[in-house]
Image: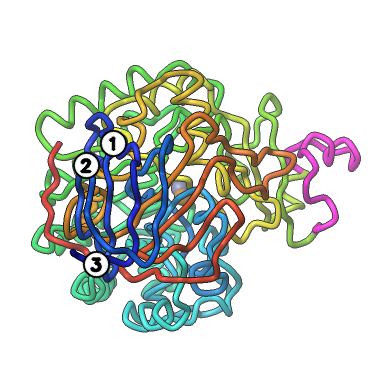
Amino acid sequence: MMTCDTLIRNARVLDGSGAEADILDIALRDGHIDQIGPSLDCRASKLVDASGLVLAPGFIDVHTHDDTAVIRTPAMLPKLSQGVTTVIVGNCGISASPVRLRGEPPDPMNLLGDADAFCYPTFAAYLDAVRVARPAVNVAALIGHTALRNNHMDSLDRTASGAEIEAMRDQLQEALDGGALGLSSGLAYLSANAASTGEMLALAQPLAAAHAVYATHMRCETEEILDAMHEAFEIGRMSRVPVVVSHLKCAGIANWGRSGEVLHALEHAQQTQPAGCDCYPYAAGSSTLDLRQVDERVQITITWSIPHPEVAGQSLAQIASAWNVSQLDAAKRLRPAGAIYHSISEEDMRRILRHPATMIGSDGLPNDPRPHPRLWGTFPRVLGRYCREEKLFSLPVAVHKMTGMPAQRFGLAGRGLIRKGFGADLVLFDPENIADTATFTCPVSAAKGIVAVWVNGVLSYTADGATGNRAGQFLPRGTTAWIQ
Ligand code: ZN
Ligand code: CU
């Protein structure tokens, strides 16, 4: 008889491809999926009866800002407790490496921590720190355009010179050689907004040969969103690189109801080039406090403020009225600060979430003392609220959006599917019970319905909490090609 480390019996297996479930046994050995079959005959040191439960590939959070969290809080509970087994860091143009600061980190790099959090001058130094920290989840990494700009430019309010672009490109190439997944940008932020399309095209040049991707927090998510999408797809097309539009949304009241147009633009691009997007399942965004997004009609909650820490948790309207000033003036006094903007329409968000091009990404902010609930709730919310209750999509499709699809698009070889020989990243959950519990008033709260999570074959989380075993690895870019 064969032997294995763990045998999971009678699970409703959703393999991550989008296919319907099958009742199967899965045997894990040496961190990998060793056997899959209806009734496996194998001697296991650990036996799990999974009757009535769904077994899926561990979820891949394609949009995170966990760069420093995986090192400083390696238990990674906000993610592990949702069944997430891999985080993609370095989104929105901000990555923890390669970074050499001169002074304070510019907005929004400060989302990753204070100046002392940036101690990885090279991508290799960052990977060493990840290995030493041994996080509970796997880590894959994008390199941030804003981080590169800040390394080589004395001021960020202009486009980069040829020499500066060359220096940025050398650093990007070095990181790609070290296994980075690609380049991210955050062109809406003032620290990158002055970068021309030409700067992006010149910088994106090494991506194609490396089979890497371009992920972008676009130049605009409000009125000019179609121009911003056009720019993103042009960069992808001219550079021959797949484009991931980050947290696709129609932000701002004037922009509500435009998700049809926006998705049409995405579909149009898909006819000639690889393109997709990620989305979080909430009608509110969160980032640093941006004066351009202050709108008296939108509810804005201040999550932190350097000059006024005492107002954290209050709405901007409350603060402004207590100070007897306009919301804009209050916002000016509060910065640097963090904010949650209730500026998305639920209808638009649902339509984007259910689109076949859409992957799930939390965009959670782990350093925020009062984080947007997406940090702890994204994946169970998609499976509970939007799949089971609202039936936006079937369970196999929901799981595909968080497993097989992201693995394939980001080139995470040997992950994201339940296949013989693949990494044993698995989540066992109760499909009738899975639900997010994190809310805007009580955002730090673990999901319900997650029964067990294995990372590289190691049982890392159960309904009783983290097991304390941390088995995450750095996942370098593989060679998988993007299939539309
Ligand atoms: Zn972003
Ligand atoms: Cu982000």
SS of the residue at dot 2?
loop
Q: Secondary structure at mark 3?
A: strand
The Cα–Cα distance between marks 2 and 1, rounded to whole angstroms, is 7 Å
**Residue 401 sits in quarter:** top left
Residue 319 magenta-drawn?
yes
Determine the residue positioned at 31% across, 45% down: 403
Q: Which mark is residue 23?
A: 1
- Is residue 276 visible in the rendered image? The answer is yes
Q: Determine the main secondary structure of the stretch shown in magenta.
A: helix
The x, y position of residue 211, in whole percent, is: 13, 58
Left or right: 330 as drawn, with respect to 249: right
Residue stretch in magenta: 308-329
Q: Which mark is residue 38?
A: 2
Residue displayed at 46% across by 30% down:
222
Are the residues flagged by discs 2 and 1 in contact, CB closer than 8 Å? yes
Mark closer to the chain start, 3 or 1: 3
* Front position in the image: 54 or 108: 54
Q: Position of residue 74 (x, y in %)?
A: 52, 71
Q: Quadrant of the N terminus?
A: bottom left
Query: Toward the viewer: 10 or 231?
Result: 10
- Select label 3 or label 1 by which is in front: 3
User: What numbered label is drawn on residue 3?
Assistant: 3
Assess disc 2: are there few (<14), some (14-19) or many (≥20) residues with their C-alpha within 10 Å of its C-alpha: few
Residue 51 on image: x %, y %:
41, 39
